[in-house]
Amino acid sequence: MATADQRTAPPDRTAARAVVDVLAAAGVRRCYTVPGESFLELADEIDRHPALRLVSTRHEGGAGFMAEADAKLTGVPAVAAATRGPGAANLAVAVHTAHQDSTPMVVFLGQAETERMGREAFQEVDLTAFYAPITKWSTTVHRADRLAEVTAEALRVACSGRPGPVSVAVPGDLFGEPVGLSGTPRVAAPPRPPLGGAERDRLAAWLTRAVRPVVIAGGGARGAREDLVRVAERFGAGVYASWRRQDVFPNDHPLYLGHLGLGAPPSTLAALAEADAVLVVGCRLSETTTQGYRLPDTERARVARIDIDPGRPGSHLDLWASVVADAGEALRELAGAPFQAPYRDWSAARRAWVESATVPLESQGHVGPGMHPWQVVAGMREALPEDAVVTNDAGNFASFLHRGWWFRHPRTQLAPTSGAMGYAVPAAVGAKLADPGRTVVAVAGDGGALMTGQELETAVREDAPVTVVVFQNGLYGTIAMHQARELGRLAGTRIGGPLDLAGYARSLGARGATVHTREELVKALGEAVAADLPTLVDVRTDPEVISPAATLSELLGAPR
């Protein structure tokens, strides 16, 4: 007997239409792309489908970052599509970002036509091999009647276990082939394995007996914020957020002890270094989170890890316990465990973090060629709503943002753990399209802003009024810091300026403002949040203030 999908499908339904039907049925709502000749029918069917939105961007990197931010914010896969060769290469940085950030995405890559493959046809690259190291699954489809099936499998793989991107390469002649009345495969919900009573009680008893227990919470716990709070309170545990996952736990909670990011002050790491029990939840224990693979110290503390993926990096640690379970399910079970730990005083550790995250008084009287970055963050805190979604780029400016902006609300931080420059602006556009009711603010340096800032035009065209704050100091600041510290001189890191970035934004149809003081910044941000157009706020910052802990001159003058 024919299914409902088969009865309503037109006899001349193409493979592209079958793919789009699978995507729509699975809850996918947006596809980001630079249109290419090798997937004409796919773009056309997405554009015609009432449940889907085709977003045409100015660069494949921008398309990929938009899809990644969309999926990270919503938890539902977004689609990115690029054509063969150059298009696929441009998209790869964003796909690598999704891979390291455990973000579910489906990536369609147009390929050379079937009869021309293997002959180094126009722009032909072995896309399956190219994308294999940066995806959960990379495949090439060779039959039109298998495309819908493979799409359903791609969605399943992207969302199962540790989420991530999946790439599907499709020869350019397949999308337009008729597949008739073949049904629409369903995508089953991914399994969410529980902790189980025995493991729950074992972990609960361990946390209860510990003297100084702490939790390291990663992106896997992002959807279980309330249960994470309940676990911390029940067991009197201090909580650290992993690298660029600061919104996983309310920063204003007395048990929040800080962010395991780059340049974390030793005072904020002390509680982790001195812990006797460390529970790692939904975190891959990256190089940055572990402070160069130094923490947690398994010689001092017992370390237990809860993760949905048994092969997750970090298994090199001498773990006391490693439990395969969904972070949300496990936290819910732990929160209800019949144990109650004694009160533990984390006030000193909490105070150390608060002091590191407080705008220094000396920055208020700063005299220099531009604003002190601390004052930029202070102006943002004054003018922007606490629940704004903040997307941030890579760069030394971000160290001030990571310390100074408090993430009090869930799903308010979108930041690449891969350290990809150019992320912030397109990510803000993707976030705004995914959740139009939210205030979305991109924060970038002038280096990253000019890598993908042209996506402001996409924001204008797609009616996505985001706010972009640019710390303009005329430097590739992170590398300048490393050069100054390691070599005592700079090479290739001065990028010129000041540039008229506000004028650049206006040339793309957006609003632009240039500010030199905190008062001007607060005024510009207030107007930007209320505007119905995207706004770029160009903040002229002092290149001397290279990090929260050093100036450029100090590093250049330091003895080698």
Image (cartoon, rainbow, N blue to C red):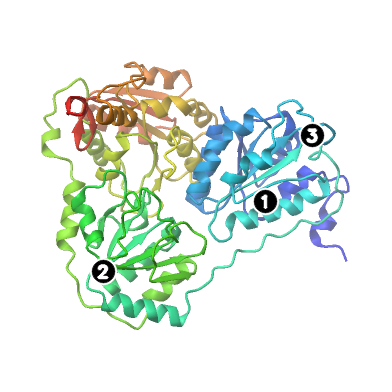
Marks 2 and 1: which is nearer the front? 2
- Amino acid at the residue labelled 3: Met
Element under disc 1: helix
Q: Earlier in the sequence, mark 2 or mark 3?
A: 3
Q: Earlier in the sequence, mark 3 or mark 1?
A: 1
Q: CA distance from mark 2 to mark 3?
A: 58 Å
Instruction: Give the vertical position of 41 relative to 280 (above or below).
Output: above
- Amino acid at the residue labelled 2: Asp
Which label is found at residue 117?
A: 3
Q: Which residue is mark 1?
A: 24
Q: CA distance from mark 2 to mark 1?
A: 48 Å
Seen at 53% across and 39% down, the residue is: 94
Q: CA distance from mark 3 to mark 1?
A: 30 Å
Q: Earlier in the sequence, mark 2 or mark 1?
A: 1
| Observer-nearest of 264 and 152 | 264
The image shows residue 514 at horizontal and vertical percentages of 31, 22
User: Is 361 on the left-hand or right-hand side of 445?
Assistant: left
- Amino acid at the residue labelled 1: Ala
- The quadrant the N terminus occupies is bottom right
Which label is found at residue 276?
A: 2
Which label is found at residue 485?
A: none
Residue lying farthest to the front in this orientation: 560
